């Protein structure tokens, strides 16, 4: 069941929203104050096909003839998370009909935070840089989440909306300050024109705290489990099929309407689903069907902290059927060796043999005791090919979760950076670069946010200070709510052609060329590596 | 790491207990008031090998030189759940050296509640009945849980301890009123002598409310999940490997020390473990190793409400590796057809096609919408052979969860009973009989319990009334805390040779003989059935 406002053309628009416990539901048109009653259909979906609704019409849903609330499946929130939703005509002059996508093994991913990648902080501003990324050898850009998040809507300045994106509350709405629906489509179309895939980071494990009206519509949350960020999404309890539908439709919506090539699912270990068909497997089934329909392979890539091979095993044997998953162990093993860091999760790393194990087995922790976690962690995944693992030497989390947001370039020598780049690009895994790492960007990437709720602002500031209380010798963490912190994180893109930055850039470019010209590098199979190594060792001992 | 008191002979006994947060731990000998300090070893296990400790010695652990508490891994609680633990010499004159076990496909299970199966309510009282069960064709008895539970210890009357067993708090202690350690061993030995396997029901999803001191020793519980019965066991959080060890050792203890053939794991859907290696899979690995060591196949059979094939899929593909699981759908489909019941979970059943689906696919609900659950339920398990499913037409839960504890014999005609028996015994699954069903026992089997905590007694009584409030036209539920309720549930074993009871008994006996002489009946493969059916249908349509 599609949810939200579907514009049909000729002023016709179908509105659909799931809400089991209300007695009445209506569409409220903002400009005319007209209310259009909706009818309850099977499964407690409220629906109406209205006439004389033009694209861009602003509306609310009115629950029980009382509260007016934005559409949980709003495709646009031009006035922010507390404002009305907007009817969107999804028609667009696509020029990517010949686009066939990029194979999993050929992915070289470049992670972008839209707000800080360019001075403008918009989708459109990314387009002129695609050519440069292409020259570097990148084959896919991955956008950090772009679902509508809070900000100061009293100004038109895009920098009034500052957010990593993981606190979004409108899963279908493209962030207005980034350029909205059409801006995103222009970017994807331009990328495909130049042979670049586009991936989007989506958050299905929780909703942000501000502008979160969705629970007023139905049982989207459950008390059965606790997430680190608040209520868990109800994937397996009463009415969960309607909640699941909301997320399944969301996945299909991004892939179908925006021609995206892949979704990166944030922190799937916090998606609690103990039913017999995991929501990830159900998503994978739908995406496979869409791939077949569109005749190009679409990907689901999970971020998971669980080191669980089940995530990427095929559905037929009970896996979740994700095409790939992030593997932090590679990063941690390399980072701890290069920097000597032993704080937090780095205490589990620091041995050369661990980096070797990451290369060979993907997971370093595949059911060993983890001192940081104080429990056993992970499981053996040697049945999965290395192309199912996305690795990095830095990403938004690894940088931004540090008090001062230091990149690897702040923490190791230039030679160290080159070594790390080689270790990454020549690995058998799918490499992911964080924007700017290819030329040793010097801007930090720290945590920033722009709530409008003063209580939240205070809570975030204090939380951040508390989190880093042990580091007070290094000073205070930058104020996450300030505009300066955000501005400080913007890339100095022009430096990429200067001095050592340029040398590093060319180093990355050459590594990628080597990777591309030696297919063996990126198609490594665990068991074959192992066998080859054993044969080699045996040959050595025989001589 | 073995936990508890291990008697080594010659007055030597090693005591081991895990307790990470205490500063001191000692063994306190009750008879002498002597305290023997324990030493903290790796992993926060406290240990001492003491001398001059004779078998049957009573002891407590003394935490921080203050509170005295029973041993969480106590093998005997002769004075009940609040009393001291007892050192057990596990030596026993076993006579079952030639016992080779029963193959999964050959299991015909007979479920027994020790307290009500015989007038005496003891292990020893079961022994004279083994021969009769053998004549019937039963190949395994399955004991409802026998871990020490609360009761009135002011009397020696076994009927002062009344409990289904699912509220046990000492997972290693054999219920004293049933006959304790030696009583259980005598029963198992006698069964094996007569070619009868013995299975034990164990509860790894929660601990009972009374006599539950285990949380004072360490983080055995977690707040991350909620169970219907209280705190969830900590299988995947900080220190979980020590908690897991407690349960792994428990499984091995029952199989090794008591020569049991299989464990039935209660309600595994309430075992929350989101780590990458599920505790069930880890249990299965250990049991497989023990099977290999003992050169006879030991089984783990899960009760699961999830209709999840993962439970019984092999570990190699990410399953939990259970040998079999209970499948309630077969029962519900048959029960709803026979009785017309449409209350509670029976509202999901009542169609003939559902019984047919249960035969063909094992699960009726393999990702269909369940009106009772108000969500989709189950998953397809056609890759698993039918011998991996245990089915019944009644069991302790299906009978005892009714307000009046009516057996099927109270709810359908004699011909209905015969039909049900045929449907069960000639099914391709592993059949389970509930004690007495083979002769149409007329005693009910209702819920009973004998807490000594007055607050709990009141709570249980009121809870039971509330649960059945909608049924008040049928009267009040029997008082679960009264001795009369318990006595009422005892079998009238002598009636098995009388009139229609005897006819039914012979009916069961003949059905089992038919099952045994036609191996095709019990080795049915889903896909083959399906193929045969299609071939048959096609042949029909061609003519």
Image (cartoon, coloured by chain):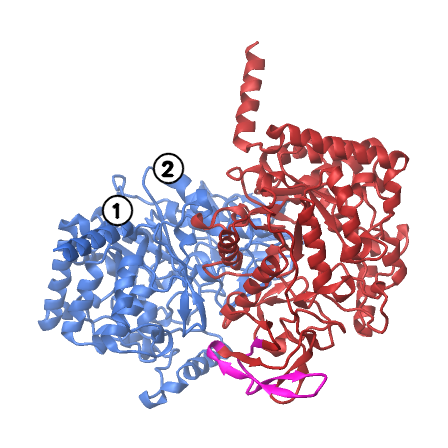
Chain colours: A blue, B red
- Earlier residue among tags 2 and 1: 1
Residue B13 location in percent, x, y? 59, 76
Residue at 82% over, 39% down: B439
- Region in magenta: B14-43
Which SS class for mark 2? helix
Q: Nearer the viewer, residue A497 or A107?
A: A107
Residue beneath label 2, please? A292
Q: How many marks?
A: 2
Task: For mark 1, give the secondary structure.
Answer: loop
Q: Specify whether A392 is left or right of B423.
A: left
**B275 part of magenta stretch:** no
Q: On what subunit does the disc labeled 1 rest?
A: A
Q: Position of residue A290 (x, y in %)?
A: 40, 41
Chain for numbered disc 2:
A
Please tell me whether residue B15 is drawn above or below residue B182 in the rendered image: below
Q: Residue under label 1, please give it.
A: A102
Q: Residue at x 76, y 58 (%)?
A: B164
On screen, residue A502 above or below A129: below
């Amino acid at each position: 069941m599609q949810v939200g406002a579907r514009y049909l053309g000729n002023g016709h628009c179908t509105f659909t929203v799931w809400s089991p416990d209300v007695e009445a539901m209506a569409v409220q048109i903002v400009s005319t104050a007209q209310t259009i009653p909706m009818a309850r259909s099977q499964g407690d979906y409220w629906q109406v096909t209205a006439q004389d609704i033009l694209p861009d019409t602003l509306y609310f849903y009115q629950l029980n003839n009382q509260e007016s609330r934005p559409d949980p499946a709003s495709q646009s929130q031009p006035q922010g998370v507390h404002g009305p939703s907007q009817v969107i005509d999804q028609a667009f002059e696509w020029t990517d009909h010949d686009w066939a996508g990029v194979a999993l093994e050929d992915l070289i991913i470049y992670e972008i935070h839209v707000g800080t990648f360019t001075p403008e902080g918009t989708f459109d501003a990314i387009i002129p840089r695609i050519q440069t990324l292409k020259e570097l050898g990148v084959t896919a850009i991955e956008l950090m989440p772009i679902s509508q998040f809070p900000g100061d809507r009293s100004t038109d300045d895009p920098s009034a909306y500052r957010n990593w994106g993981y606190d979004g509350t409108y899963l279908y709405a493209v962030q207005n300050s980034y350029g909205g629906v059409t801006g995103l489509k222009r970017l994807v179309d331009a990328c495909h024109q130049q042979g670049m895939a586009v991936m989007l980071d989506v958050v299905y494990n929780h909703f942000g705290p501000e502008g979160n009206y969705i629970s007023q519509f139905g049982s989207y949350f459950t008390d059965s489990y606790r997430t680190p960020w608040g209520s868990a999404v109800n994937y397996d309890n009463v009415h969960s099929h309607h909640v699941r539908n909301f997320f399944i439709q969301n996945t299909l919506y991004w892939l179908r309407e925006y021609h995206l090539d892949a979704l990166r699912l944030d922190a799937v270990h916090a998606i609690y689903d103990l039913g017999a068909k995991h929501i990830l497997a159900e998503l994978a089934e739908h995406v496979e069907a869409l791939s077949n329909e569109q005749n190009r392979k679409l990907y689901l890539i999970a971020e998971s902290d669980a080191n669980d091979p089940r995530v990427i095993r095929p559905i037929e044997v009970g896996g979740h059927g994700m095409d790939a998953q992030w593997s932090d162990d590679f990063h941690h093993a390399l980072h701890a060796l290069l920097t000597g860091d032993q704080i937090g999760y780095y205490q589990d790393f620091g041995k050369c043999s661990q980096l070797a194990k990451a290369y060979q087995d993907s997971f370093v922790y595949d059911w060993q005791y983890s001192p940081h976690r104080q429990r056993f962690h992970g499981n053996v995944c040697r049945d999965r090919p290395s192309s199912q693992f996305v690795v990095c030497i830095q990403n938004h989390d690894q940088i931004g979760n540090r008090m001062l947001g230091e990149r690897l370039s702040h923490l190791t020598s230039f030679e160290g950076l080159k070594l790390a780049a080689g270790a990454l690009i020549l690995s058998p895994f799918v490499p992911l670069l964080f924007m700017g790492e290819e030329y040793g960007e010097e801007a930090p990437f720290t945590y920033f946010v722009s709530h409008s709720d003063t209580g939240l602002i205070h809570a975030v500031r204090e939380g951040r200070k508390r989190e880093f209380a042990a580091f007070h010798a290094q000073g205070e963490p930058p104020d996450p709510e300030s505009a300066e912190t955000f501005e400080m994180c913007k890339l100095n893109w022009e430096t990429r052609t200067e001095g050592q930055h340029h040398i590093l850039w060319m180093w990355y470019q050459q590594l990628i060329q080597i990777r591309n010209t030696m297919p063996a590098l990126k198609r490594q199979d665990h068991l074959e590596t192992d066998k080859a190594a054993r044969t080699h060792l045996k040959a050595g001992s025989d001589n």
